Image (cartoon, rainbow, N blue to C red):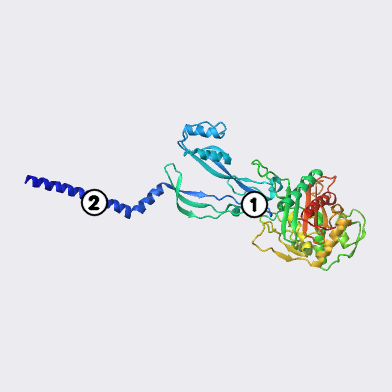
Amino acid sequence: MNIYYKNWRLFLIFLFLFFSILSILVRIIYVQVEQGNFLLQKGNNQNSSERIIEFKRGSIFDKNGIPLAISITGFDLFALSGLKQDDFLRIQNIINLEGLKYENFDKKSLIKKSLSFDEMRKIRSLKIDRLELEKNYKRHYPLGEQVAPLVGFSGKDGYGLEGLEKSYNAILTGKPLREKVLKDGARSAIERLEILEFGEKSKDIYLTIDSNIQYIAYKYLVEAIKNNDGTAGTVIILDNSAKEVLALASYPSYNPNNPMRSIKKNRAFLESYEPGSIVKPLALAGAIENNLIDIDTEMELPIKIDIGGNIINDRKKYGKLKAFEVIKESSQVGATQISFLLGADRLIENYKKFGFSKPVNINFPSTSFGEINTRDEISDIEIATLGYGYGLTATPFQISQAYAIFANHGFYYDFRIIKDDEYPIFSEQVISESTAKNILFAMTEVVENGTGILAKSENYDVSGKTGTTEKLRDGNYKSSSYTASFIGIGPNPSNNLTIFVNIDGLGSQKYSGGSVAAPLFKNISNDVFAYMGYFNK
């Protein structure tokens, strides 16, 4: 009986152990099957974090694929918590740490910025797990000052701060990818858990700018400004057939690759000025369109006229001039008579048809669009001065697009600066084809026999117009500071290009559009026409 009792007790013990083990197994299976996903998620939440992956910033190219703004890949080297001194010395043996000494790294610390690819390769070959290489991108502008006021630059965070870099920042940057990642005990990412937002890849931009033509424009512009003791200037070159901007040079400029750069504005879009005599062909076109005058109508011109005590005079007594000769000689008296023929309302409306006082369709930060004196009780002297380019302001780009109308058979076009832009080009016929031809004839006379004779080329026939503006300062025009301008269309008869040039801040010794701006136009147009393979004479 004693033996029986002992066997029974042993049986109960084994039975207890069996059920205990069985209950444990059941619990394990339950936890694994029923709560596994929940517990896994809880664990991942404690060892996961959100990570944002920025795409490499898109590049900006000229029309031929030459880079104007690119991002160069670089690497920064960081020490992680627990980096050993022996490993630090191994790093020191292969790259220059610029006097940095070992310390007990208790957090992620920058060791060296901007490693070269060779340094990065050597660091990776060490296979030290307490190091981290962090990729970064440095923006570089190969053409530097030539295109800086147009292209602009981006900041350290990759965000566009000036110029086209700013205007097209969203396209160049894209939208970053957001994801949840699992991290190990050292807080390094080891697995992607979930994509929170797919993002959008950055894109490159191709401009209509031709970097070779841009170089020609900028080189001659800087040379002319320095030779004539000017302070600033602009060159714009438009392709009349393709409706594209081929060059847009602005001086003074700056080096966009220098972190200490001093930003200079893009004068083509931001500098509104009184254009002076350059507007005379626009006023004559308006008078012809309104059937008030013909291109060869003969006009009686006194050497001076008195308008309410204000004397307007010409440089010599012409007696009689035909309408086209008023443009050729740039007669102030003749321009005044044309203004009075039109009257204030029609004159102002005519300038607006040519695009003045209206924004240009170019995506550029803070673009100016000038203004016209449109007050209700405009005086006779104000009407007169509107006819020869005072009392209104316009940007060089507005003037360039206005003159392209004559080359494009009377049609106004919005010119592109982004190649293959998806939006259609706006166009509108603002003057007749015959009027456009008549004005081109008058402008040809300007170059052949008039105020723009210094723009005349031995190799090409061109049309053009001079402009000279005395700058308003402290409420008067006695500042002895001038802006000289010239705009030309050529080579005739194709008239493929419109080229605008101006030089600002000229003194009283040499300042006219004919003596300063016309020779600059000649230098630029000769080289550009030759580069583009145009043959004329």
**In percent of the image, x 69 and y 44: which residue is there?**
254
Left/right of residue 168 with respect to residue 472 in the rendered view: left
Quadrant housing residue 288 = bottom right
Residue 217 x %, y %:
76, 50
Q: CA distance from mark 2 to mark 1?
A: 70 Å
SS assignment at label 1 = strand
> In front: 252, or 303?
252
Using the image, determine if residue 377 lies above or below residue 66.
below
Residue 152 at x, y percent in the picture = 66, 48
User: Which dot marks residue 22?
Assistant: 2
Badge 1 amino acid: Ile
Q: Circle 1 is placed at which residue position? A: 60
Mark 1 crowd level (few <14, some 14–19, many ≥20, 10 Å Cα): many
Numbered tag placed on residue 347 in the rendering: none
| Residue type indicated by callout 2 | Leu
Q: Nearer the viewer, residue 288 or 381?
A: 288
Judging depth in this view, the residue of 397 and 143 nearest the camera is: 143
Q: Is residue 329 visible?
A: no
